[in-house]
Image: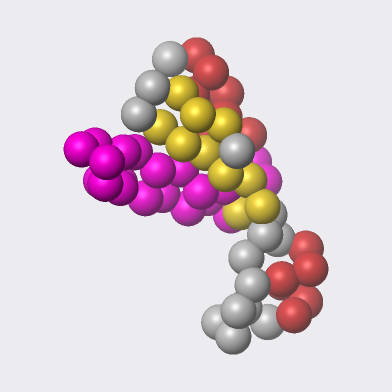
Amino acid sequence: MITSGTGVAVLGRTTGFHVVPEVEKKETILRIAEVRNDLISEWRLYSDTKEIEQQLESDIDE
């Protein structure tokens, strides 16, 4: 987990009945949340490795 200002990022895997086991084993998910007034105001999910790398680079540049 990484925090910065009002943002939180969590890198991990997703599980559950909505995900087939083959995908569950391979797929990495990046969850990014924005917190305002102690509530989650924005929730984004990134599941493509390239997309995750681009988002992390973008967040670091800000």
Residue 27 counted in the magenta span: no
- Quadrant of the drawing holding the N terminus: top right
The span shown in magenta is 30-51
Q: How many marks?
A: 0
Q: Residue furthest bottom?
A: 17
Residue at image coords 72%, 72%: 23
Q: Using the image, determine if residue 21 lies above or below residue 11.
A: below
- Quadrant of the drawing holding the C terminus: top left
Residue at image coords 38%, 22%: 5
Residue at image coords 50%, 14%: 61
Q: Position of residue 56 (x, y in %)?
A: 57, 29
Task: Report the side of 5 relative to 40 (left or right).
Answer: right
Q: Residue furthest left?
A: 37
Q: Using the image, determine if residue 7 lies above or below residue 20.
A: above
| Quarter where residue 36 is shown | top left
Secondary structure, magenta segment, majority class = strand
Task: Report the side of 20 relative to 6 (left or right).
Answer: right
| Quarter where residue 10 is shown | top right
Q: Using the image, determine if residue 23 lies above or below residue 3.
A: below
Residue 40 counted in the magenta span: yes
Q: In the rendered image, is residue 48 in sight?
A: no
